Image (spheres, rainbow, N blue to C red):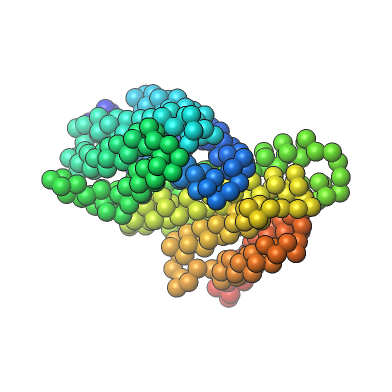
């Protein structure tokens, strides 16, 4: 296809990896989705509720990251691509709206919107790359086959109830999660290659960083909205400060150096597809999950600083733990190091030490929240100091 008619994103120029305003507009739907997820977890704070919300959280992330891959290949500044994103926004709002009742009355809305976004977007991509090299069309055809297969189980699950719906949707999500690791192999069509997944590294890194900002922003919104409804008191003000410091520390751990160094690495990599698949497609789900669970924990501590149930205690510790685990693996994959950062490993260990003590109810919810925040602050400070010292040593 001639360059003037091609819908592909440009490569090699300074603006080729720039995130467009229409992509940021599209992301507003997922601000709502993240809010719905955190509220759903808070309303169903149990093992069963956590499993359901975890499934929906991964599904929301999956539909977002797949769309980000598409806009990495296709130019959202071209009118057809922009219109396609607007269509996905409508479906995304339906998906987000159905989250609180996805396992009760709105199962078909959730499954239908999800399948429409996944399958419909891929059909659109097949149309958009007509006239481009055949390997691009074949890549999307393979993806379509896997998403159509999973779609059968998404829709079927919507007509089931309770644990049967959960099992059917879990199978559907598993099909989608394993498909990239199998290179979307399809009988008769073969499998895709990493060359087929050549990405614009600048764009992919910035898109995922923006989603982390969305999650952190939702955490701050929850903190501010909850605090605004409370009567002023010393425990309430302290819990507010602890929550805000926790969000700042999370931002520092991810953005101070790790995101920038990973951004530089993928932008200059000769194999960006592999890094985009592992570090950004899979591992960022842990980071985002950690922020969402931490937002729930912050609200619990603000509302009940004196006491937390066992489920609440797990949420207070699990949020920072998931966040640090995701960051540790992300930085390990994206850096030339034999082990994940020591600061992150120590932070993960300290949180695990806190768990049995907290379940013995030795701490109030506020003290436990302060301790977990202190662990994340420790990791942020430790990593910052270590990096500054290594840079200073390298200069000498």
Q: Position of residue 206 (x, y in %)?
A: 48, 45
Of the 4 image quadrants, the one containing the N terminus is: top left
Q: Tell how many labels.
A: 0
Tell me what residue is drawn at x 75 percent, y 44 percent: 303
Q: Is residue 160 left or right of residue 44?
A: left
Q: Position of residue 259 (x, y in %)?
A: 52, 54
Tell me what residue is drawn at x 75 percent, y 64 percent: 362
Q: Is residue 101 left or right of residue 197?
A: right
Q: Is residue 174 left or right of residue 54?
A: left
- Seen as rendered, the residue at the extreme right is 233
Is 381 situated above or below 311? below
Tell me what residue is drawn at x 44 percent, y 32 percent: 107
Q: Position of residue 43 (x, y in %)?
A: 62, 40
Relative depth, front residue between 229 and 242 = 229
Residue 231 location, quadrant: top right
Tell me what residue is drawn at x 77 percent, y 50 percent: 305
Q: Is residue 358 left or right of residue 75?
A: right
Residue 118 visible here: no
Q: Position of residue 317 (x, y in %)?
A: 63, 58
Relative depth, front residue between 16 and 56 = 56
Residue 219 location, quadrant: top right
Residue 112 visible here: yes
Of the 4 image quadrants, the one containing the C terminus is: bottom right
- Seen as rendered, the residue at the extreme left is 188
Is 331 situated above or below 69? below
Relative depth, front residue between 48 and 253 = 48
Is 58 situated above or below 27? below
């Amino acid at each position: 296809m001639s360059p003037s008619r091609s819908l592909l994103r440009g490569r090699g120029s300074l603006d080729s990896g720039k995130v467009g305003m229409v992509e940021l507009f599209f992301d507003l739907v997922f601000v709502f989705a993240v809010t719905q997820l955190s509220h759903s977890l808070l309303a169903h704070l149990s093992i069963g509720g956590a499993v359901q919300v975890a499934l929906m959280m991964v599904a929301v992330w999956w539909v977002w990251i797949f769309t980000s891959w598409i806009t990495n290949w296709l130019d959202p500044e071209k009118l057809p691509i922009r219109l396609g994103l607007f269509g996905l926004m409508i479906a995304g709002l339906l998906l987000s709206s159905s989250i609180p009742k996805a396992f009760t009355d709105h199962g078909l809305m959730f499954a239908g919107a999800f399948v429409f976004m996944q399958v419909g977007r891929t059909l659109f991509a097949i149309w958009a790359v007509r006239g481009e090299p055949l390997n691009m069309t074949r890549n999307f055809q393979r993806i379509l086959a896997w998403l159509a297969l999973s779609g059968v189980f998404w829709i079927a699950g919507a007509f089931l109830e309770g644990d049967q719906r959960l099992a059917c949707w879990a199978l559907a999500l598993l099909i989608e999660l394993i498909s990239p690791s199998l290179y979307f192999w399809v009988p008769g069509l073969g499998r895709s290659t990493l060359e087929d997944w050549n990405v614009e590294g600048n764009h992919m890194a910035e898109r995922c960083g923006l989603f982390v900002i969305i999650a952190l922003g939702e955490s701050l919104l929850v903190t501010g909205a909850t605090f605004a409804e409370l009567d002023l008191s010393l425990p309430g003000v302290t819990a507010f400060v602890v929550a805000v410091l926790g969000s700042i520390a999370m931002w520092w751990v991810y953005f101070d150096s790790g995101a920038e160094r990973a951004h530089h690495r993928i932008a200059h990599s000769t194999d960006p597809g592999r890094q985009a698949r592992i570090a950004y497609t899979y591992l960022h789900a842990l980071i985002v999950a950690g922020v969402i669970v931490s937002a729930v924990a912050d609200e619990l501590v603000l509302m009940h600083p004196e006491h937390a149930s066992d489920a609440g205690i797990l949420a207070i510790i699990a949020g920072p733990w998931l966040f640090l685990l995701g960051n540790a693996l992300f930085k390990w994959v994206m850096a030339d190091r034999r082990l994940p950062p020591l600061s992150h490993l120590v932070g993960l260990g300290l949180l695990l030490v806190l768990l049995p003590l907290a379940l013995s109810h030795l701490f109030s919810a506020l003290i436990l929240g302060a301790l977990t925040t202190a662990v994340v602050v420790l990791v942020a400070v430790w990593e910052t100091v270590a990096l500054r010292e290594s840079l200073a040593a390298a200069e000498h």
